[in-house]
Amino acid sequence: MLKGINITEKLLLFLVLFFIWETGKAQDSTDYKIKSILGNVIIKANKLQVKLKDVSTQIEIIDEAKIKRANGERLPDLLKSSSSIFIKSYGITPDLQTLSINGLGAEHTLILLDGVRLNSFQNSQIDLSLIPLENIERIEIVNNGVSSIYGSDALGGLINIITKNRLLLPDSRDYNIKLSFSKGSFNKNSYSVRLEKQSRNLNADLYYQKENSDGNYKYYFNNGIEKVLKERENAAYSIYDVGFNFQYIIDNANRIRFISLYSHQNKNVPGIETGTPPPATKQFDKNWNNILISENLIAPKLTLHTNLNYQNNYMNYKVEPYLNSSYKNIVYAVSPELKYKDRIIRLTGGYNFTHAELKSNELEDGIKRNQHAFFLTSVLEFINRIKLYPSARYDYISDIKQSAFTYKFGVNYQPLKDIDFSLRGNAGKNFRAPSFNDLYWKTGGNRNLHPENSMNAEVGLYYAFNSFIQGQINIGYTYIYAKDKIVWKPQSNGFWSPVNIAESVSKDFSVSLSAKREISKQFTAVLDAGINILNSKKISQAYPGDITKGKFIPYVPLLSSNIALYLKYKFIELNLFYSNIGKRFSDYANKKQLNPVNTAAGNFIITTIFWEVISKIKLEVNNIFNADYQIISGYPMPLRNFQITISTNY
């Protein structure tokens, strides 16, 4: 009966039938009460500290357990298993890795680290390969715009990275030492050291991680006659990361925390595959990020939360002997926020000030920006089981002398008293300010640009179950109309220059399932599955008769799905991952189409405990079935590859 239906359609059918089955079981039980653990996770991304089941927008949680079960050591290795995110990969990590949410570009997704902005003011993006997994405790993925809280770049969605932290006073004083070593394909070697110490009021940790590889993975190249097996050239890299976290806990309501993170990458850049040897291209990155956070209870219902941030990021891009470009970005920011909480209202209001400057031989001199912002967000519960989420923000951007007012209104309704079932919806306005590259590039910058804008709307439902299986289902639909999008166009002088001309519409339907079954005290199975059906089109024309009007936006899959299966028996774990990336185009005219991608990966973990020493052996396999594929046209991805990691925790 299912013959002719592809695997993604089968997955969607399964998720819908599973939802109907579980709902029916709940309604047939007179004393059925859902106790969802995941639904009670406190969300930080909306600055209101509400439970996942109570939010008005779709939010995906990647917890610490999923991070430990994933393959790889850096952020894009983890995020590619999410069905709500499309990773635009130019090769193995640490080659350039950007993302897309809701069919919009990387410049339309805001990346936060403990609530602090990471997107560069230079291009409104960040290379995800710069972020290691070692210091991450949890990730929150917000599947819609949140400019009314965070301002520019949060037009399509938001990712909040939460670093490892112990919030409560410890019952005892202890320390921890973790050592790990990895060996993998392409002559990859990596090791890490992490030291943790805590006392009654203090906790601190320090980690160091180093990785290097020849990057010479094998792939197939079509030379016009046949496919030939080749080896990636000019792809070696050496990277290391250092992190320091310190926290002084006065009591459970007052604390001070300091985070300092440094990433250093020295890598060759292989570039697009043309069949000829690549040029000698090199890239050097140094990123230093410092965050000081204080939380102070100043009244029984009132808390002052303050963030101070300093970033110093440098990049050198060199194509010998033709090009030598350098970019140094400096950011200072301060964000005091007042949080009020009582029985029917939670309210957070604050002021954000950011100073950003850029020095580069490719851009004009004296580039600086001062951005002032005021915001207010709240959740109101005047009526039982109905929560309202109004929020608004005002931004002033000094270098373009323009302002932006954004807003959002959301609702969460739980119609059934004893079941974790909620309906949600929201609508609002979002924006992105022009980047320094857009405004001040020497050969084509346009100082007359104004911010991009969008109107976003979303509806969805959340359902948690705990009968034979414990888990949750999330269904959502998001609509985004974006206008005044900045597009670089060729000019009469032969150079390209950005203009505010593009409009697009994105329609995103998604279904996700997370289910857990404890088959016995020693055997546990977890299934995560998700599907995205996305229609993202350009609806404007750059000139009369523009054939790209009404066409799909390049490198946005029309359909994608992910499945992850986690099995644990005693001290043995088997984790399997499947990913499908469907039809997509590599040009705006939709004349060039990339083949669908189906990949599988997995790992096998053995854990032993001897006295107080926990040791693990982890064997990873990527691209199990040796698929020949590209995510970005001209950038081949590696065939089957392996890695083994040995770690000890004392």
Image (tube, helix red, strand yellow):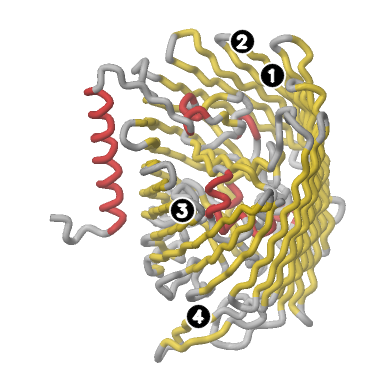
Report the residue marked by disc 1. Answer: 339
- The one nearer the camera, 377 or 402, is 377
Mark nearer the N terminus (4 vs 2): 4
Report the residue marked by disc 2. Answer: 342
Report the Cα–Cα distance between label 3 and label 1: 45 Å
Q: Are marks 3 and 1 in contact (CB under 8 Å)?
A: no
Report the residue marked by disc 4. Answer: 219
Report the Cα–Cα distance between label 2 and label 1: 10 Å
Mark nearer the N terminus (3 vs 4): 4
- The one nearer the camera, 50 or 537, is 50
Q: Residue extending furthest bottom?
A: 225
Name which residue lies at 56% across and 44% down: 484
Q: Are marks 3 and 4 in contact (CB under 8 Å)?
A: no
Q: Residue extending furthest right?
A: 366
Mark nearer the N terminus (2 vs 3): 2
Residue 239 in picture, x, y percent from top left: 74, 66
Front of the two marks 3 and 1: 1
Q: Are marks 2 and 1 in contact (CB under 8 Å)?
A: no
Mark nearer the N terminus (3 vs 1): 1
Amino acid on which the number 3 mark rests in the picture: Gln
Residue 491 appears in the picture as rendered: no
Q: Are marks 2 and 3 in contact (CB under 8 Å)?
A: no
Q: Check residue 541 in the rendering and tell me which mark sits there, or answer none.
A: 3
Residue 406 in picture, x, y percent from top left: 60, 29
Report the Cα–Cα distance between label 3 and label 4: 38 Å
Residue 20 in picture, x, y percent from top left: 24, 34
